């Protein structure tokens, strides 16, 4: 992971699947190992935070499935941000405590407990002071997978609403503050399981743009693996995760997104997924099933040509 982070050399890195501890010791060790990221942010995720309820209705309490978000201990698999530039200058809004039933037009089942939070992991609006752009608001989340449930589609409904939250947020967001929506939606709007309507609204939102970062490695992987990938309708170049393509998994999908404000000019974008065998591909595969999605952005000024 550290070698990949150094190679990408991003101004801001959003990290998923990193455990939270009270003093952020794990995050500090990781950031120090990468080097060059003096600004760090992490807050306690909902994963592993017990509800005190039998959330999955199996007659037992205190299991990972009974937490606000699936986790074997409080703080498991959280989110973090490391940056070369200051974070949280004038904005840090943590929406992670919002109850699921409080979201307008939610798809929560009638028997969802009032204490159940919407966020599986977190929903943050966190500002970063970017050179030449002033403060930019990062809108960050990591949603539940829309599977591993029963015929009531509890996880599918929650996954949908975790994306729908951002459409609601953008309705009232300050139009003068540039935003970048980034996170693990855990949903492919073309292939795989789930309810894609809310994510499709974000992809087509008038305030956002989808530069469609791509890789040659995604194409090669889909061709080599076959299996479920052969039946997918989406462009494999856009895939961001290499999941099993047999009966155990859905195959390669596009589930990780960066959607910048339309005021940004996209200078370059891609998915770090090499097509050729070698040390870099080995590092990529060892780091995670998810591939790094990256963008090089420049905020347009009023003097830029139309």
Image: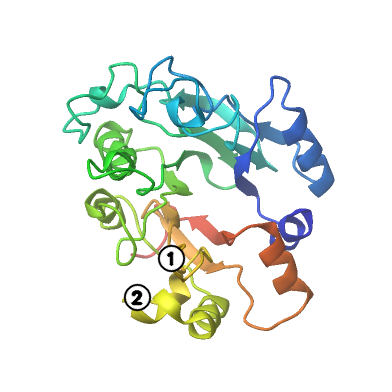
Asked if marks 2 and 1 touch (Cβ < 8 Å), the reply is yes
**Quadrant in which residue 111 is drawn:** top left
- Number of marks present in the image shown: 2
With 67 as the anchor, is 233 left or right in this view? left
Residue assigned mark 2: 232
Indicate the secondary structure of the residue bearing disc 1.
loop
Residue 255 visible from this viewpoint: yes
Residue assigned mark 1: 253
The numbered mark, 2 or 1, whose residue comes first in the sequence reads 2
Indicate the secondary structure of the residue bearing disc 2.
loop
Which residue is nearer to you in this view: 294 or 11? 294
Residue 60: where, in percent of width, then height? 43, 22
Residue 129: where, in percent of width, then height? 58, 37
Which residue is nearer to you in this view: 40 or 122? 122
Q: Residue furthest front?
A: 59
With 141 as the anchor, is 15 left or right in this view? right
Query: What is the quadrant of the C terminus in the image?
Result: bottom left
**Quadrant in which residue 167 is drawn:** top left
Query: What is the quadrant of the N terminus in the image?
Result: bottom right
**Quadrant in which residue 159 is drawn:** top left
Query: Quick one: label 1, few (<14), some, or many (20+) residues within 10 Å?
Result: many
């Amino acid at each position: 992971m550290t070698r990949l982070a150094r190679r990408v050399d991003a101004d801001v890195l959003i990290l998923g699947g990193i455990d939270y501890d009270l003093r952020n010791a794990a995050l500090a060790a990781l950031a120090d190992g990468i080097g060059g990221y003096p600004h760090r942010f992490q807050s306690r995720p909902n994963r592993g935070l017990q509800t005190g309820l039998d959330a999955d209705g199996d007659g037992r309490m205190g299991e990972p499935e009974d937490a606000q978000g699936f986790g074997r201990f409080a703080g498991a698999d959280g989110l973090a941000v490391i940056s070369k530039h200051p974070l949280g200058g004038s904005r840090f809004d943590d929406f992670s405590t919002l109850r699921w039933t409080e979201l307008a037009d939610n798809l929560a089942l009638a028997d969802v407990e009032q204490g159940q939070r919407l966020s599986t992991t977190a929903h943050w609006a966190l500002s970063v002071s970017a050179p030449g752009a002033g403060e930019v608001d990062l809108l960050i989340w990591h949603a539940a997978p829309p599977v591993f449930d029963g015929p009531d589609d509890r996880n599918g409904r929650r996954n949908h609403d975790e994306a729908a939250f951002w459409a609601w947020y953008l309705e009232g967001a300050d139009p003068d503050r540039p935003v970048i929506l980034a996170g693990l939606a855990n949903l492919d709007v073309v292939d795989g399981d789930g309810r894609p309507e809310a994510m499709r609204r974000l992809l087509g939102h008038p305030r956002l743009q989808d530069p469609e970062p791509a890789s040659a490695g995604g194409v090669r992987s889909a061709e080599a693996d076959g299996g479920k990938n052969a039946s997918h309708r989406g462009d494999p170049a856009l895939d961001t995760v290499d999941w099993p393509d047999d009966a155990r998994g859905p195959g390669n999908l596009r589930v990780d997104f960066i959607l910048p404000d339309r005021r940004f000019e996209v200078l370059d974008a891609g998915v770090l997924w090499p097509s050729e065998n070698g040390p870099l591909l080995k590092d990529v595969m060892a780091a995670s099933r998810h591939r790094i999605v990256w963008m090089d952005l420049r905020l347009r000024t009023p003097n830029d040509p139309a």
